[in-house]
Amino acid sequence: MTQVCVRGKELGGAQFGLAAMPLGDSWRRHRTPAAPGGSEIVVPRPNYVGMPLLAVIDDRRVISSLLSDREWQTLRADVRSGRQTVRLECGTPAYLRTSRLGVRHFVHQYASGCLDHQKETGQHLFAKHVVVQAAKSAGWSAEPEARGNGWVADVLASNGERKTAFEIQWSTQTRAEYERRQARYAGSGINGVWFARRERDVPYPRHDLPIFHMAFAENGLTVTVNQSTMTMADAVVALLNDRIGFREYVANGRPASLHVSCVDYPCYRCNKVSMIWDVDRETIQGPCGTTAEQHTGTIWAKIRPEAEPQILRRANIEAERIGLSSATLGQRYSRTAGGSYTAFSCPNCDALFGDWFLRSHMLEARTAGAQLDLMVPAGRDRISSPHWCVDTGSGLCANSAG
Ligand SMILES: [Zn+2]
Ligand SMILES: [Zn+2]
Ligand SMILES: [Zn+2]
């Protein structure tokens, strides 16, 4: 069967000024190259395009990605002259070829009958090759198209007892299918790691399903791990060396910063202006660069961050600096709140400042930019934010288990 195919590139609207062309069949007829003999005719493909990196030569398993130039040339000469026979794992005889992206691999001499080697694209082949070489450079052994109990891994990396299967997920795959295949790996004591081409395949970070988005960029393959984009080779090495790890929390060994806003507030009863303050959130930045944020917006609370000794001390210093008294913070009873809570009151006449009024006053001040912002390192030591933590030279976030 002969397929006629206009190359995707040439269908690109920009290239031919598609917008300016009449739509419908006329332009398509115009652009479809005349067969036969046109360069657009695609040679019929075998129905089978698995491109293994692994072959068997005299009972020896040979990985094309790991051969030197010299070894590859020699092997090719030997196969051509009939001195060597190369077979694939499925038993099919094979020859040697270099892909358009420069990847040396093996090709089925005939396509029919092989169920072992799945169809794959040149990019998929290239990605396998990158992973094999990266795993090797990390000091692990790497086997492409590795087979086990109910699974075939694109690349299986091993280091003693530790085994990681890398999967290049070129086509989209349902979450259930990821989970099913991940469970198969887990059943064999293997940690599965996925590089997915479809960004929507990447889940909210979870430790039991490492899926990272990969892209084919002009200068090679990239992988994005928690907002840092790196080459696929670097990602593989970092994953194998535990420089990428799952963390439930962002933590850097120091307390989170409390974000405090101070504003002046005129007493509704005596008109005396005092300073009130509000802690609206705390943030922490991990050594990986991830920032986690926790909002602290409760009203009528018994314990509130504004009354923390360090915040209180800092607020008093600021009030004095700007020439105001701090409002008084203490336990008050409120019928509206249905009990006692920590509240601000006037330092002059002791009038209670209701939280609702303070909140809207604070909101107005923030909108107008009339507040004084402080950052006080007095927050919690970690903030929940599940992420794939990347060591970019400053280590990983402190482990939540610690
Ligand atoms: Zn095969
Ligand atoms: Zn007052
Ligand atoms: Zn981190």
Image (cartoon, rainbow, N blue to C red):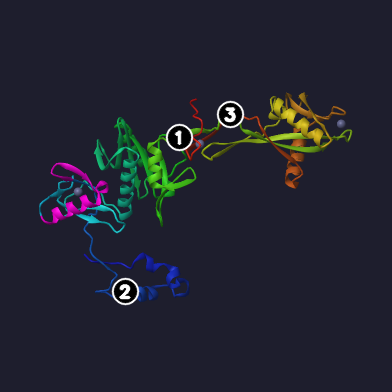
Instruction: Give residue 150's mark.
Output: none
Q: Percent x, y for residue 40? A: 29, 70
Structural distance between the alpha carbons of marks 1 and 2: 52 Å
Residue that carries the numbered disc 3 in the rendered image: 381
Sequence order check, earlier mark of 1 and 3: 1
Q: From this viewpoint, which residue is outermost toward the right?
A: 270
Nearer to us in this view, 277 or 24 = 277
Tell me the kind of residue under disc 3. Asp
Instruction: Give residue 33's mark.
Output: 2
64 magenta-colored: yes
Sequence order check, earlier mark of 2 and 3: 2
Name which residue lies at 44% across and 68% down: 13
Query: From the viewer's perspective, is the residue at label 2 or at label 3 nearer?
Result: 3
192 magenta-colored: no
Whether 382 is drawn above or below 368: the answer is: above
Q: From this viewpoint, which residue is outermost toward the left?
A: 82
Instruction: Give residue 246's mark.
Output: 1
Q: Percent x, y for residue 38? A: 27, 73
Tell me the kind of residue under disc 2. Pro
**SS at mark 1?**
strand
Q: Is label 2's Cβ within 8 Å of ligand 1?
A: no
Tell me the kind of residue under disc 1. Phe
Query: From the viewer's perspective, is the residue at label 1 or at label 2 nearer?
Result: 1
Would residue 10 be found to the left or right of residue 372 on screen? Answer: left
What segment is highlighted magenta in the picture?
56-81
Sequence order check, earlier mark of 1 and 2: 2
- In the rendered image, is residue 364 in sight? yes
